[in-house]
Image (cartoon, rainbow, N blue to C red):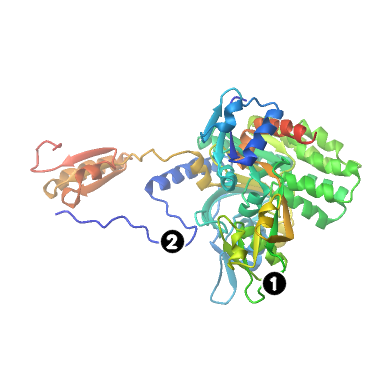
Amino acid sequence: MCVELPMPFMFEKPLGMRDSLPLLYERKKNLRLAVSGEFEAWGYQFIETPALEYYETIGEASSIQNQQMFKLLDQQGDTVVLRPDMTAPIARVAASKLLKQQVPVRLAYSANVYRAQQKEGGRAAEFEQIGIETIGDGTISADSEIISLLISSLKKAGFTKFQISIGHIGFIQQLMLDILGREDRVSQLSNYLIERNYVGYRDHINSLALANIDKQRLIDILDLKGTENILEKAGALLEHNRGAEKLNELAQLMQQLKEYGAEQYVSLDLTLMNTISYYSGIVFEVYAEGVNFPVGNGGRYNSLLKKFGRDTPATGFALRVDRLIEAMGTLKDQAEIECVIFTPERKQDALKLVNERRAGGSRIAMQDLNGIGDLDSFTKNYSEVHYFIGAPGKDETP
Amino acid sequence: MNEMLTMAMPKGRIFEEALELLRQAGYSLPQEFEDSRKLIIDLEDEKLRFMLAKPMDVATYVEQGVADIGIAGKDVLLEEEPDVYELLDLHISHCYLAVAGVLGSAINEAAPKIATKYPNVASHYFREQGEQVEIIKLNGSIELAPLIGLAERIVDIVSTGQTLKENGLVEFERIAEVTSRLIANRASYRLKEQRISEMVERLSKIINK
């Protein structure tokens, strides 16, 4: 007898929450395997941290906007948050536990983070990040290593067209501070770069009471994009060479990336700034063909660990799994799963085959013929179907 | 350098002014372009594809990446706050956003109502002024609202002021100046950097003349 199934029905989920159905799940798993395999091959170790953290520590340190955090009260009445990123929790762990043993440490994670979305309903409020953090190493070698690892893991995951834009927060802040003289003016002007509003940036500069030469210096920042050739142009904008050591860091970084054979994937953009306030030095964003938002970002955050009582430099990056999946294009590949369809009198034969196959590494499901509603639509889901039907010894295909 | 660059253009008056600008910048666009009713126009020689969209939707197309770049009014950018690069002020289609109403009319202190096509801009503006208002979203003929008692004030785009005048309305405050802007999708700006920078450079030469 066939069982009547109700019409498919999506029960409402909280805003921004999504299900991963089997096809998508498999894709995510494969991506995670490829990327995490590469992280491990480079000597990074995975850790897990809890989904709930204290608002006052992790929430504050994470630099995700307050209204974007999911907050709740625990039974003691303390405010806790669903972790809005992984960098702050890892900094917490590293400061309290790991750094006592060895410096530097190489850590990796793959975890869901939570950010309430202001914009219209569709955007994900829970998404998976996979990334690494190198803590306790302030050298450019650490920066070039993580960028090279990023490139290498994207390649392992099958990506060919992607671009990493690299900037330096320290450089741009120094330059702006030299010209504008005050932190609040710097942050006012920086906002235009964070919003990627170059028109507003130029208009704001023109409205300031500055010498024309200084206005031009600020406007010229917008041209600091391209290969390492722009570093010379950038140097010419500095006063008394303050900030030159930051440009030198970038020059070293580009040189080292060449040694890794990574130069075709990277370019410099000294206007790069973002809302994540703990970044202090080299920062970068990753773009892949087919996705309209960055698929990942990272950078150096030398002062974040101070918030957890340990003053040590760190650098890292995170990739967004959902956006990388989007970059891979339509989901069409189907998992290789076989199926054995049996009738009860042949179950023994069916089990024998199934056990053999499973031991050999195949994925194979068993299904009683009497439980199937529509045979055609059922078998469509499997790469191969074996039949054990009717009296023993008979042919295996109907 | 051979990849197609997709450009979302607003239909109507801005489109013509923008085409003129592109021609001056040396892009060879056929003369019959303006009269075409096609929504997608490919220019093989220039490796450009134009998409004609409703002005309010241009920013959305660019943000979502179906267009690499686009031309959008600052009014749309203020209203929609899209996550895009705002690269260049094209200085065309100059107008402004303003608060208007019937001459001499007072605002209802208890529950002032504001009719507008720009609910985001309007509520942001009145919040900044420290006024509590109720925003009523309309899709057109905004000038009607104060005349029929739907709202005390409107927030709308004003170019010559003629429409306001003909309907017996006056402008009370200016909110923001509006011109058309060249915007770019975040990923396209990185992946088609050369082509986009080239266009910015060619256009800025014309604009700054």
- As rendered, which of B133 and B194 lies closer to the eye? B133
Q: Quadrant of the C terminus of chain B?
A: top right
Could you confirm whether marks 2 and 1 are on the same chain? Answer: no
Q: Secondary structure at mark 1?
A: loop
Q: Which mark is residue A340?
A: none
Q: Which percent across, then down, holds residue B146? A: 62, 65
Picture quadrant where residue A246 is located: top right
- As rendered, which of A366 and B36 lies closer to the eye? B36
Residue sitting at x 82%, y 48%: A205
Tag 1: amino acid: Ala
Tag 2: amino acid: Lys
Q: Which percent across, then down, holds residue A371? A: 19, 52
Q: Which mark is residue B106?
A: 1
Residue sitting at x 25%, y 40%: A356
Residue depth check, mark 2 versus mark 1: number of the one nearer the observer = 1
Q: Which percent across, then down, holds residue A9? A: 33, 57
Determine whether, in the image, residue B183 is placed left or right of residue A31.
right
Chain of the residue under label 1: B
What residue would you read off at disc 2? A13
